[in-house]
Every structure is written in C-alpha cells, then in structure tokens.
Image (cartoon, rainbow, N blue to C red):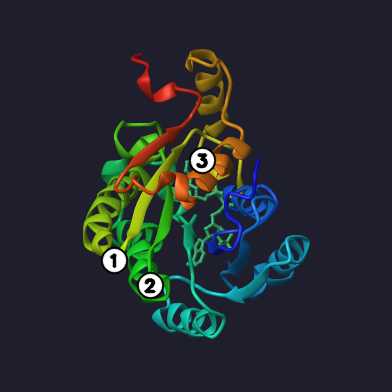
C-alpha cells in the first residue's frame, strides 16, 4: 500500500481489544500513515486500550457515547490538536437476553438501549465532529446483514442496524454540502466480544463458510482495507453507501 492516509487524522471509537474490528481498522489506518485517536468506554477498558494505543502511537481518550458531556469533552480535546479527517464509529450494544429470546419479546428499555448505544451515538458523534472536519472528511460506521434480513437471534440489533443504515443516508444528505461523506461497511460475521453475545453465533459462521461465493468467512483485515478506501481521497465520490465486505454472502438466496 502507499500511504493513502498520509497527513490525515482519524478518530476511531470502539476498540475494546485486539479482536475488535475497530482495532483492525486502526492498524490499517496507521499502516497508511494516519495519525490516530482511540477512545475507550470506561475505566474497565482503560488499560487495554491504552496498551493498544501505544502500539499504534495513538492518543487515547475516554468516551462513553451515551454521555453528551463525554462526546463534548472529546471534541474539545481534538479541537486543540487541529483538524479531523476521519471518524470510525464501531460501536454497538444490546442486552444479552434480547439476542436470544424472540424479537417480539424485546422490552421497551432493551429496545431503547440498543438504539441509543448503536444508532443515536452515530448521530451525536457526527454532529459533534462535523465542525472539526472543515474542508471535508469521512465518517464511517459498521453494520450487518441483519439490518435487511432476518438473522436468527440478531433480533433488536437487526432493527437497530436498519436505523443505523437509514441514519447513514440522512447524515450523508445533511453533511454532504460541507464535503463530509458518511458511509457504512456491512461486514460479514467475525468472532469478536460483541458477536459472542449472539446465541449460536458459530452456526452463522458455518453457514457463511458453506454458502458465501468465496466459501470462507470475512477477515477483519478486509473490512479494515475497505475502511482505508472510504477514508481516503480514492472514495471522494462515495457517500450514503452501505458497502458489503462479507465474502459475497449477501447476494445468495437460501
Ligand atoms: P467489539 O470489539 O465488542 O466492539 C464493540 C465496541 O462497542 C466495544 O469497543 C464496546 O466497548 C463499544 N461500546 C459499547 N457501548 C459503548 C458505549 N456506551 N460507549 C462507547 N463504546 C461502547 O465488537 P465488534 O464486532 O468489533 O463490533 C464493532 C462494530 O462492528 C459494531 O457496530 C458491530 O455491530 C459491528 N459488526 C460486527 C460484526 C461481527 O460479526 N463482529 C459484523 C458486522 C458488524 P466496551 O467493550 O468497552 O463496552
């Protein structure tokens, strides 16, 4: 590769550990010359994320995306460090019981929590980051096929991903006149901490391996390289898109 992100600064939210899709993206951004800022949700993750940040020479800050003050404080810190070129939102959460019982039994608090953490946070972060992206930039989020198809046990998270993908389109429309592009990668299933909360996740992986055109699962590095493309000037004409990086699984019927 050839320093596709040289001179750019990227904010990456959602690194929990070495297996996080956000960490694969951070590694690829660093390889391409980007300066990085990573965030962690709270004290429990601080040491891990600071360790991973040190590997990538990244600044590391605390930000619970459900707290407006956290988002505001983060942007104040970034403002002091110059402009921002890219934001990667790689965050989702739902109660474990809502990822195993029938969707019809989702509670009101469970529904609202999943949407607050996994969807509204993109809106809040995009609004706060936009003024730092004067002259243009790229905002990227991570979605999944459960947004458009019924995937066993994905339930409320599928509904949240549908709202996330619609939010990508509305944000792309609002922020496009300022030169800010907003896209999502719909990634194939990858064994991460968040994915392990989905009951029978290993069956989903087996199904992809058996049926995807490429007859294998998705490598986080493939998601990361697509994120590099979307953050780079190569994607200057691409906004409001949901780009599938899933070994082709989404085109298949039964
Ligand atoms: P992950 O490593 O567990 O990442 C999820 C991240 O969300 C964690 O860093 C988690 O932080 C963070 N988070 C949750 N609540 C938060 C809050 N209130 N404030 C700040 N951060 C919060 O799992 P992942 O699979 O890489 O997930 C990243 C994104 O990819 C998610 O949007 C997920 O839906 C999407 N995705 C995943 C797959 C897959 O199969 N793995 C496929 C398609 C799309 P803590 O751990 O500190 O709570």
Under tag 3, what secondary structure? helix
Front position among marks 1 and 3: 1
Position in image of residue 58 (x %, y %): 68, 67
User: Can I make out residue 104 in this image?
Assistant: yes
**Residue at image location 30% in from the left, 52% down from the top:** 168
Tell me if 242 is positioned left or right of 87 in this view.
Answer: left
Up-down: is 90 above or below 77? above
Under tag 1, what secondary structure? helix
Under tag 2, what secondary structure? loop
Numbered badge on residue 134: 2
Quadrant of the frame with the C terminus = top left
Q: Nearer the viewer, residue 114 or 75?
A: 75
Q: Are the residues flagged by discs 1 and 3 in contact, CB closer than 8 Å?
A: no
Q: Earlier in the sequence, mark 1 or mark 2?
A: 2
Disc 2 residue: CB within 8 Å of ligand 1 = no
What is the CA distance from the residue labelled 1 to the residue labelled 3?
23 Å
Q: Quadrant location of residue 10?
A: bottom right
What is the CA distance from the residue labelled 3 to the residue labelled 2?
24 Å
Quadrant of the frame with the N terminus = top right
Tell me if 93 is positioned left or right of 242 in this view.
Answer: right
Up-down: is 191 above or below 18? above
Position in image of residue 19 (x %, y %): 66, 47
Tell me if 19 is positioned left or right of 197 in this view.
Answer: right
Which residue in the structure is indicated by mark 3? 226
Numbered badge on residue 178: 1
Q: How packed is label 3: few (under 14 Cα within 10 Å), some, or many (20 or more)?
A: some
């Amino acid at each position: 590769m050839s320093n596709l992100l040289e001179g750019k600064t990227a904010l990456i939210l959602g690194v929990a550990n070495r297996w996080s899709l956000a960490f694969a993206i951070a590694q690829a951004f660093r390889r391409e010359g980007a300066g990085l800022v990573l965030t962690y949700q709270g004290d429990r993750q601080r040491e891990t994320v600071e360790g991973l940040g040190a590997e990538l020479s990244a600044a590391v800050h605390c930000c619970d995306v459900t707290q407006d003050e956290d988002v505001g404080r983060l942007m104040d810190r970034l403002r002091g460090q110059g402009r921002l070129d890219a934001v990667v939102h790689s965050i989702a959460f739902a109660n474990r019981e809502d990822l195993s019982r029938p969707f019809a039994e989702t509670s009101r608090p469970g529904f609202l929590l999943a949407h607050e953490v996994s969807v509204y946070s993109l809106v809040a972060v995009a609004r706060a980051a936009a003024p730092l992206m004067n002259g243009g930039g790229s905002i990227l989020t991570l979605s999944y096929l459960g947004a458009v198809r019924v995937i066993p046990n994905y339930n409320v998270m599928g509904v949240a991903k549908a709202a996330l993908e619609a939010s990508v389109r509305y944000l792309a429309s609002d922020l496009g006149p300022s030169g800010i592009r907003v896209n999502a990668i719909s990634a194939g299933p990858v064994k991460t901490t968040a994915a392990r909360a989905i009951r029978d996740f290993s069956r989903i992986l087996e199904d992809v391996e058996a049926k995807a055109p490429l007859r294998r699962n998705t490598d986080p590095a493939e998601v990361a390289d697509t994120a590099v493309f979307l953050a780079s000037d190569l994607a200057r004409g691409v906004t409001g898109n949901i780009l599938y990086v899933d070994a082709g699984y989404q085109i298949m019927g039964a």
